[in-house]
């Protein structure tokens, strides 16, 4: 069996796990190793250049090395007749939950204000909100959104809601579904967590109009995709105080351009798309299970729905 790796990221972390979990596979790196395109059985990809994936006529599946498949689905020549499998990994979910818990607590406890006060040499204690009253709203109640919601529930956040395409029955989490319920979801949300995939429908979902539906002084945490937010509208909302502060891990353009306003705004916290990094060890184990399913004539788990776009 031949596995081809296509990514700008180094192949090194994948070598040992692939030898361990796919011991019979021969491994190839695109652009480096020679392999006849017709001999490729499986492709492992992260952000491949457009057009490349159409070249492997006998590939049985494409495994995306992250949860979000927007970079693949932008490719008009993406093969439609083999499974595109996205990464669903408990490690990815728990790292994301850590990131969300970190920033929710940061804003809940007013750390953005104390950071500003420290820079001004100002000693002013403020009141402290209660976790059980704090209204957290999660846009996207999928694998990552649900895990983050459960982590927050365990910390005593009892006022959690989520918004998704389909309604969810999740103990302790209020479910809002579909465009008709978005405004109500936003109106009740003080800390907004964005964990939606980047699709045609979610593109620019957070804009001047929707940001204005949040209560004044709300917080935004975006670790879904940069395309969810109209950045100029968020900047305006941050300048007027409609949004008190934002923690942003993903952007319209990555790396974030040097001259971008976000870098120097003292109510914006920028991280370089690290909310949850793929762990090559656990991911390879999951990919190996997917390959085994295909070799047994079954469909692997977590095949992307090309119509929905995630
Ligand atoms: P899932 O596919 O499991 O969940 C997506 C959620 O979004 C689902 O609840 C889905 O609704 C909802 N959704 C999608 N489209 C719409 C829509 N148009 N309207 C309302 N709800 C919608 O994805 P994951 O939770 O695994 O991952 C989410 C995203 O997180 C990834 O796509 C990726 O972009 C991002 N990510 C970012 C990382 C980082 O480091 N910053 C790391 C990993 C992922 P429904 O349940 O009804 O289908
Ligand atoms: C992912 C990501 O989708 O890293 O896994 O953004």
Image: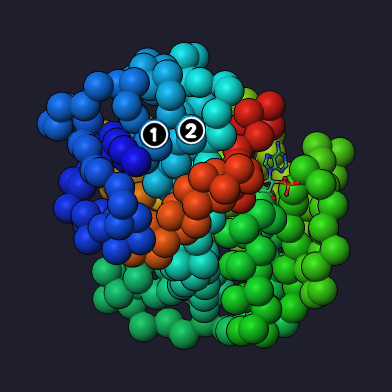
Residue 117: image location, x then y, percent: 35, 72
Inter-mark Cα distance, 1 to 2: 6 Å
Q: Name the residue at 60% across, 76% down.
A: 151
Q: Is label 1 in a helix, a strand or a loop?
A: loop
> Label 1: how many residues lie within 10 Å, few (<14), some (14-19) or many (20+)?
some
Q: Check the picture and name the quadrant holding the C terminus.
A: top right
Residue corresponding to mark 2: 60
Judge left or right: residue 30 versus residue 77: left
**Which sits earlier in the primary sequence, circle 1 or circle 2?**
1
Cβ–Cβ under 8 Å for marks 1 and 2: yes
Judge left or right: residue 77 versus residue 37: right
Q: Nearer the viewer, residue 191 or 41?
A: 41
Marks counted in the figure total 2
Residue 217: image location, x then y, percent: 60, 57
* 236 up-or-down from 164: above or below: above
> Label 2: how many residues lie within 10 Å, few (<14), some (14-19) or many (20+)?
some
Q: Nearer the viewer, residue 162 or 14?
A: 14
Q: Name the residue at 45% across, 67% down.
A: 91
Residue 192: image location, x then y, percent: 62, 56
* 239 up-or-down from 15: above or below: above
Q: Is label 2 in a helix, a strand or a loop?
A: loop
Kindly tell me whether residue 201 is visible in this rendering.
Answer: no
Q: Name the residue at 74% across, 48% down.
A: 164
Residue corresponding to mark 1: 41
Q: Which colour scheme is used?
A: rainbow
State the image quarter where residue 212 is shown: top right
State the image quarter where residue 307 is shown: top right
Judge left or right: residue 288 versus residue 144: left
């Amino acid at each position: 069996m031949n596995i081809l790796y296509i990514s700008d990221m180094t192949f090194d972390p994948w070598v040992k796990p692939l030898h361990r979990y796919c011991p019979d596979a021969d491994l190839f790196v695109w652009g480096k190793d020679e392999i006849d395109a017709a001999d490729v059985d499986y492709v492992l990809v992260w952000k491949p250049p457009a057009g490349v994936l159409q070249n492997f006529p006998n590939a049985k599946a494409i495994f995306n090395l992250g949860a979000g498949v927007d970079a693949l689905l932008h490719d008009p020549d993406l093969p439609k007749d083999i499974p595109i499998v996205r990464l669903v990994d408990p490690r990815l979910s728990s790292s994301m939950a850590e990131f969300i818990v970190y920033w929710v607590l940061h804003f809940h406890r007013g750390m953005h204000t104390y950071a500003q006060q420290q820079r001004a040499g100002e000693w002013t204690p403020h009141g402290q909100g209660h976790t059980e009253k704090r209204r957290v709203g999660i846009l996207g109640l999928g694998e990552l959104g649900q895990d983050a919601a459960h982590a927050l529930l365990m910390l005593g956040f009892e006022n959690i809601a989520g918004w998704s395409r389909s309604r969810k029955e999740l103990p302790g989490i209020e479910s809002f579904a579909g465009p008709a319920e978005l405004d109500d979801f936003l109106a009740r949300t003080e800390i907004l967590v964005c964990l939606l995939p980047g699709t045609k429908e979610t593109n620019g979902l957070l804009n001047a109009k929707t940001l204005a539906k949040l209560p004044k002084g709300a917080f935004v945490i975006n670790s879904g995709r940069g395309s969810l937010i109209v950045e100029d509208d968020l900047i305006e909302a941050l300048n007027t105080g409609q949004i008190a502060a934002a923690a942003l891990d993903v952007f319209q353009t990555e790396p974030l351009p040097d001259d971008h306003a976000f870098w120097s705004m003292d109510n914006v916290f920028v991280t370089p798309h690290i909310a949850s990094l793929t762990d090559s060890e656990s991911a390879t184990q999951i990919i190996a299970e997917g390959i085994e399913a295909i070799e047994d004539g079954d469909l692997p788990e977590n095949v992307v729905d090309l119509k929905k776009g995630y």
